[in-house]
């Protein structure tokens, strides 16, 4: 199971989301991956096209889980269920 945070440099909301996700993922022994959509656009322009205007976005195993704010309660419940 992997939690991925889609972000971009200079995004304060993205920094807050990362700060929320780090302890949550650690508590559940889940891998946290951070992807800058602008850097990734060189190889995957659709990623920025799909998510770039509503960052930060949290993916759970590649599926959108939340965007804007981290839905911690829902994510914890989903991580326990898997």
Image: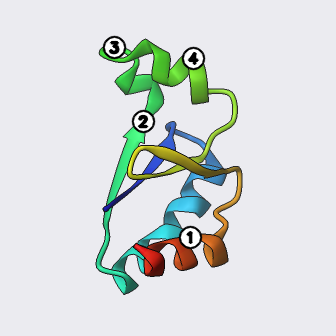
Label 4: which residue?
49
Q: Which residue is mark 1?
A: 75
Residue in the image at 49% along x and 45% along y: 63
* Crowd around label 4: few <14 · some 14–19 · many ≥20 (10 Å): few
**Badge 2 element:** strand
What's the distance in space between the residues labelled 4 and 3, CA to CA? 12 Å
> Which quadrant holds the C terminus?
bottom left
- Name the disc covering residue 42, or none: 3
Looking at the image, residue 54 lies above or below residue 72: above
- Point out residue 58 in the picture as x, y percentages from the top left corner: 54, 52
Q: Nearer the viewer, mark 1 or mark 2?
A: 1
Of callouts 1 and 4, which one flags the residue occurring earlier in the amino acid sequence?
4
Marks 1 and 4, how far apart at CA: 25 Å
Density class for disc 3 (Cα within 10 Å; few <14, some 14-19, many ≥20) is: few
- 21 vs 50, left or right, is left
Tell me: residue 25, above or below residue 68: below
Rendered image: mark on residue 40: none
Label located before the other in sequence (3 or 2): 2
Which-is-in-front pick, marks 3 and 1?
Answer: 1
Between the C-alphas of marks 3 and 2, the distance is 11 Å
Asked if the residues shown at circle 3 and circle 1 are in contact, with their CB atoms under 8 angstroms apart, the answer is no
Closer mark to the observer between disc 2 and disc 4: 4
* Residue 80 location, quadrant: bottom left
The residues bearing labels 1 and 2 have C-alpha atoms spaced at a distance of 21 Å
Identify the image quadrant of residue 50: top right
* Residue under numbered circle 2: 36
Is label 1 in contact with label 2 (beta carbons under 8 Å)?
no
């Amino acid at each position: 199971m992997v939690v991925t945070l889609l972000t971009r440099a200079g995004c304060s909301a993205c920094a807050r989301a990362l700060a929320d996700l780090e302890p949550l993922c650690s508590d559940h022994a889940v891998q946290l991956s951070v992807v800058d959509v602008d850097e990734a656009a060189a190889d995957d322009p659709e990623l920025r096209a799909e998510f770039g205007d509503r960052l930060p976005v949290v993916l759970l195993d590649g599926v959108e889980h939340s965007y804007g704010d981290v839905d911690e309660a829902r994510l914890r419940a989903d991580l326990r269920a898997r």
